[in-house]
Image (tube, rainbow, N blue to C red):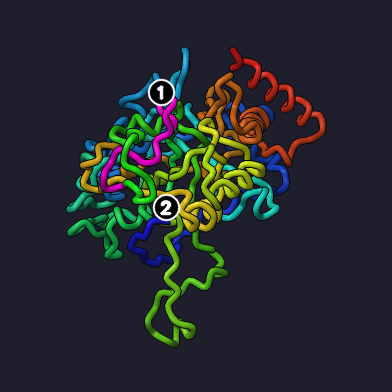
Amino acid sequence: MKSIREHASLCVTVLALVGLLFLAVPRLAAQQDAPPIGGDADDTFNPPPCDYNDTFYQDNGLDPTQLVGRFGSARQFGPPATGKQANWVADSTCVTKDPNRRNFRILATTGGNSDDGNSPFSTGTQETFEFISILAFVTNQSNFETTYSRTVGAINGGLDGDQQNAGSTISIVNSQNPRNIAMQDLVSNFEGYAALKQKLPNGTFALNPCAADMQSPLAPPTPCFPVNTVNTVFTPNLRQDWRFATNRNAMDGSDNNCISTDPAVCPNGVSDSPFGYFCDDLLGMWILTYFWFTQPPNTTVQPCHDIFAAIGAKNGFTLDGTPIILTAHELNDELEANNCGAEGQEAVDGTDGGAVWLVCPAIPDPRAGAIAPDAFLDQVRLSNGVPQNLALTANFLSLQIFGLFPNELTVSQKSQLNKAVASASAATTP
C-alpha cells in the first residue's frame, strides 16, 4: 500500500447494512422478492444505486461541477456498456427512495475482489466480491472544497427532508470538516487497484506507466502503458478485475481502535486505525492505485519466474499472461518485496492527466433488489468474450435473479443459476 497520512475515526452512526456486504446469513424471506420486482417495502429499504445529488456531494467536501464523466450527465453509452446497453437511465423513484440521490439510476455494476486477506487460495476462505458503481472521476485535489457552509433543513428556501438535524450547520473551513479532517485525506485511505493492460497493441510488454513520477526504477521507462486520461481505467483496458482495499474499522471495537492521548481512556496507547468505509467515506470514494509487473510474463529472472508460476497456478492468469493478483499479500509480500512488481498513484495536482480518485460507492448489501433486473455486470472478459472470473458472474446473476448470494439458494435455484451462467457465457462468445 502506498504510504498516506492516516487518521483515526469512530463510527458514531451505526448503519444497519454494515457487515452484510459479504457475510453468508439466513435468507431474507421477508425482505426480498423472488425474483426482485418493484413497488414494495424492501425495494425502498435496499434500492438499486442512483447518483448523488449536488448538495450531498457538497456536504461531503466535493465540488460536483468538477466531476469528470459523471453518470447521469455523461457516459450514458460506451464503456462499460456495449451494444444497446446504457450505463444509466432516468428514474423518478431515486429521490423518493433516498433524498440524497438524484433521479438517475445506475445500470453498470462493476465487480471486483475485496483484497483484505481473503483469497480462496492463500487463506483457504471463499473469495469475496464487491459490487460498485463508478459514478465519476476526480482528477485534481482542487476539486475538493476549501470553503463551504450550509444550514441543514434549507435548500433554495425549501426543506431538504433532514428535520432531525434542522438548524445545524455543515461547514468546511480551510479544506477541513468540523472534525478537522480534509476529505482528500479521508478518502485516500481506501484504495481501488486498477490493473491496466501492459501488453501494447504491437505486442510489446510495457514495464512502466507513461507518467514519470509514477515509474518504478526496477524497469526501463519505455515502452510504457498510458495513464493520461480517465478512459484508461475503463474495463476494456484492464488485464484483470478490480481489487478494493476497504480497511474498515470494526464497529464492535474488536480492532482495539483508540485515539485518545489520555492513558485512562487508552491504557494500551493510541491505536490509529484507518477510517471506516461505510461510516466515514459517505461518497464511497477510493484513491486509484495502479499496480503492474516489472518483469514480463515469460521472465526467466528469479525469483520472479517462480513467483509468477506459483500465483498463476492458484489464481489463474490475466489477459497479459501475468498471474491474477487477489490479495495485498500477493502484491506487497510476493511481488513488490522481490522486485517483481510495483504500484503507484497519479499526481494529485492533476499533471498526469488521469483519474486520481474514483467516486464509486460499494453496494452495502447487494441482495433483495439492490441488483436490478436491468443492471449489467461490468467485468473483464477473455478474448473469446467469456468472463474471466465465472464465480463473479455467478455471484452477480444470483443476486440479480433471486436477490440472494449463491450459498443461500435452494437446489432448484442453483440449477437455474447454473443455466443462467452458462447462457451468459455462451452469449458473449463470438
Distance of label 1 from label 2 (alpha carbons) = 32 Å
Which structural element holds mark 1? loop
For marks 1 and 2 on the same chain, the one whose residue lies earlier in the sequence: 2
Q: Nearer the viewer, residue 341 or 170?
A: 341
Q: Seen in the image, is 338 located left or right of residue 156? A: right
| Residue depicted at x 49% and y 33% | 239
| Residue depicted at x 32% and y 37% | 222
Q: Nearer the viewer, residue 58 or 288?
A: 288
Query: Residue 190's mark?
Result: 2
Name the residue that disc number 1 marks.
Answer: 201
Residue 385 picture quarter:
top right
Q: Is residue 121 magenta?
A: no
| Residue depicted at x 64% and y 40% | 31
Disc 2 residue type? Phe
Locate residue 396, reporting x and y percent.
61, 32
Locate residue 386, reporting x and y percent.
61, 23
Span shown in magenta? 199-214
Task: Specify the principal SS of the magenta part.
Answer: loop
